C-alpha cells in the first residue's frame, strides 16, 4: 500500500486552498473618518474568535502613495498605547477604546501626519511593536505583519459593529 506524505496531499497552489487570513478573517472597512480632502480609511479584519486586527486600507494615502514613514507616535494625550497591559480571559487592565479613539499617529517624510482610529468599541489587546522597529511593514504587509493593533470588541456590540462596516466588495467598487 502506498502512502502519500501529508505535505504532498494538499495542493496549496490550488484556487480552492485559502490562506489563513481568508479562512479565519472577514475583512470590513471603516470609512467614517475620511473626508473629500483626506482619505483615512481603515481595514478591520474580524477573526472568528472576535479579535479584530486594525490596519490601514488600500486607499489610505500612506499605502496608496507608498509614503515613507518617519515615525509612529503611540502617545495620545497623556496615554501611551504601548504601555497597555491586559491579563486574564476578560483582559482586565486593558485600555478601553471608543470607535473614535486614536491608536497612534503616523508621521511621513513629506510632512504629512495621519491619525489611526480604533474604529471599534472594545479593549486594546496590543499595539504591534514591530511597526515601531520597521514602519514600512504598514505598507508592505498591512494585513499581516504590518497591522496596527488588535482589539477585542465588547460581546454585546460585536455583530452590530461588524454589520455596520463596509464589505470588501462594496469598498473595492
Image (cartoon, grey):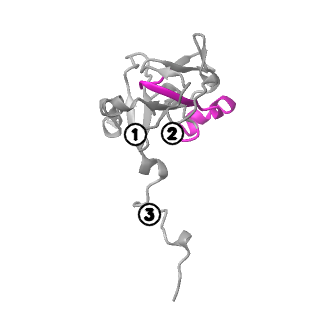
Which residue does the numbered mark 2 point to in the structure image? 143
Placement of the C terminus among the 4 image quadrants: top left
Mark whose residue sits in front, 1 or 3: 1
Label 2 to label 3, Cα distance in Å? 22 Å
Whichever of labels 2 and 1 marks the residue nearer the N terminus, that label is 1
The stretch of residues the image draws in magenta is: 116-145
Q: Quadrant of residue 136?
A: top right
Q: Residues within 10 Å of mark 1 (few under 14, many from 20)?
A: many
Q: Give yes or no for residue 101 being in the magenta stretch.
A: no
- The answer to whether marks 2 and 1 mark residues whose Cβ atoms lie closer than 8 Å is yes
- Label 3: state its secondary structure: loop
Q: Position of residue 110 (x, y in %)?
A: 60, 18
Q: Is residue 114 above or below residue 158?
A: above
Horizontal relation, residue 93 to residue 29: left or right: right
- Label 1: state its secondary structure: strand
Which residue does the numbered mark 1 point to in the structure image? 27
Q: Residue furthest bottom?
A: 1
- The answer to whether marks 2 and 3 mark residues whose Cβ atoms lie closer than 8 Å is no
Which residue does the numbered mark 3 point to in the structure image? 14
Task: Identify which residue is drawn at 46% across, 32% down.
Answer: 152
Whichever of labels 2 and 3 marks the residue nearer the N terminus, that label is 3
Label 2 to label 1, Cα distance in Å? 10 Å
- Label 2: state its secondary structure: loop
Task: Identify which residue is drawn at 37% across, 25% down.
Answer: 31
Mark whose residue sits in front, 2 or 3: 2
Q: Quadrant of residue 92?
A: top right
- The answer to whether marks 1 and 3 mark residues whose Cβ atoms lie closer than 8 Å is no
Q: Residues within 10 Å of mark 2 (few under 14, many from 20)?
A: many
Q: Is residue 7 above or below residue 161?
A: below
Amino acid at each position: 500500500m502506498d502512502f502519500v506524505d501529508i505535505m504532498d496531499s494538499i495542493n496549496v497552489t490550488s484556487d480552492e486552498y485559502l490562506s489563513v487570513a481568508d479562512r479565519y478573517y472577514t475583512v470590513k472597512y471603516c470609512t467614517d473618518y475620511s473626508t473629500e480632502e483626506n482619505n483615512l480609511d481603515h481595514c478591520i479584519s474580524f477573526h472568528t474568535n472576535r479579535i479584530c486586527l486594525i490596519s490601514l486600507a488600500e486607499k489610505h494615502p500612506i499605502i496608496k502613495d507608498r509614503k515613507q514613514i518617519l515615525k509612529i507616535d503611540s502617545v495620545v494625550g497623556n496615554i501611551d498605547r504601548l504601555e497597555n497591559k491586559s491579563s486574564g480571559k476578560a483582559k482586565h487592565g486593558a485600555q478601553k477604546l471608543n470607535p473614535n479613539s486614536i491608536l497612534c499617529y503616523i508621521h511621513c517624510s513629506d510632512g504629512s501626519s495621519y491619525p489611526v482610529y480604533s474604529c471599534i468599541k472594545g479593549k486594546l489587546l496590543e499595539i504591534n511593536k514591530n511597526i515601531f522597529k520597521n514602519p514600512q511593514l504598514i505598507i508592505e504587509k498591512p494585513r499581516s505583519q504590518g497591522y496596527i493593533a488588535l482589539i477585542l470588541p465588547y460581546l454585546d456590540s460585536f455583530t452590530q459593529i461588524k454589520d455596520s462596516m463596509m464589505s470588501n466588495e462594496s469598498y473595492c467598487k
